[in-house]
Image (tube, helix red, strand yellow):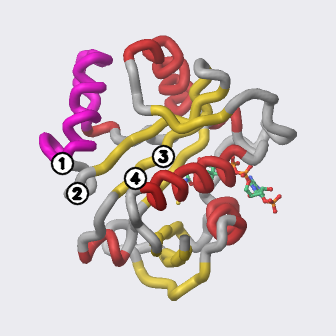
Amino acid sequence: MNGDTDAMAKGPAEPGRLELVAPAERFETEFWAMWDEYVEAGERYEPRSLLPPTKDFPAYLHRLARTAQGTGRLPSRVPMSVLWLVRDESAIVGTCYLRWQLTPALKHEGGHVGYKIRPSQRRRGYGTRILALALEELREKGIRRVLVTCNSDNSPSARIIEKNGGQLENRVISRISGKDVSRYWIDL
Ligand SMILES: CC(C)(COP(=O)(O)OP(=O)(O)OC[C@H]1O[C@@H](n2cnc3c(N)ncnc32)[C@H](O)[C@@H]1OP(=O)(O)O)[C@@H](O)C(=O)NCCC(=O)NCCS
C-alpha cells in the first residue's frame, strides 16, 4: 500500500468547518509548514514543477492561477485547478487537483481529480471528504461522469473512491510508472 507513509494520526477529524479554497497569500506560513511535513515524510508535494526555485510564494500562486486558466506551464497539459481543503479558514489539511477535461493520457491514468492529505492529518476521514467536495466542484461545472484513478496497491485511495460511489471499470498499466492502476467512474 503506498497511500500513507505516516499512519500515526488515526482518529476523528477535528471539529470545524471544512471547505475547498483557492490558494491565497494569507496561507503562506501554513503552506510552508505543510510543505515541510511532506519533505519530512519523504513525499513529493505537487505541483512541485510550478514552485519557483527561490520559494517565491506569490510567484507560485501566480503560476497556479495561470494553470487554472489554462495558460502558463501545465503539468497535466489541460487547465488544472489546485484547491486546498481548509479547516476553519486557516489550517490546510489537504490538496486536490481538478481537471476539467480529459486528454487520452488522462483517460488512461490521472482522470478528472487527484488528492493528497497532509501526512499529519491522515486516517481521520479527510481523504474521503476531499473527494466528496471535489466532486461537488466538478458537478457545479457540469461534469456528470468523473474518472478517478489510483495505483491498485493504494488501498486507502481505492476505499475513498469506492465510498464516493466509484465503479471500477478496469485496471491498466501506467505509462509513467509501469504500475498497475485502477480506473473508476463516478456518476454525479
Ligand atoms: C490516500 C490518502 C489521500 C488517504 O487519506 P486519508 O485522509 O487517510 O483517508 P481517510 O481517512 O478518508 O480513509 C479512507 C479509508 O482508507 C483507510 N485507510 C487510510 N489510511 C490507511 C492505512 N494507512 N492503512 C489502512 N487503511 C487506511 C481508512 O480506514 C478508510 O477506510 P474505512 O472508511 O473503511 O475506515 C492519503 O494517505 C494520501 O494523501 N496519500 C498520499 C497521496 C495519495 O496516495 N493520493 C491518492 C492518489 S490517487
Give the percent coordinates (x, y) of residue 121.
70, 35
- The residue under label 2 is which amino acid type? Val
Instruction: Return the x and y of residue 185 as percentages of the image width and height.
Output: 52, 77
Q: CA distance from mark 4 to mark 2?
A: 10 Å
Q: Earlier in the sequence, mark 4 or mark 1?
A: 1
Q: Name the residue beneath numbered marker 1.
A: 70
Question: Residue at the location (40% across, 53% down)?
Answer: 98
Say if mark 3 contacts mark 2, CB within 8 Å. Answer: no
Give the alpha-carbon distance from disc 1 to disc 2, as whole Å.
Answer: 6 Å
Residue 71 lies within the magenta run: yes
Disc marking residue 132: none
Along the viewing direction, whichever of 20 and 64 lies nearer the viewer = 20
Residue segment shown in magenta: 50-73
Which residue occupies 35% across, 45% down?
Answer: 81
Label number found at residue 96: 3
Q: Is residue 33 above or below residue 3?
A: above
User: Which amino acid lies under the numbered mark 1 shown in the image of this protein?
Assistant: Gly
Residue named by callout 2: 78
Upstream in sequence: badge 4 or badge 2: 2
Mark 1 vs mark 2: which is more N-terminal?
Answer: 1
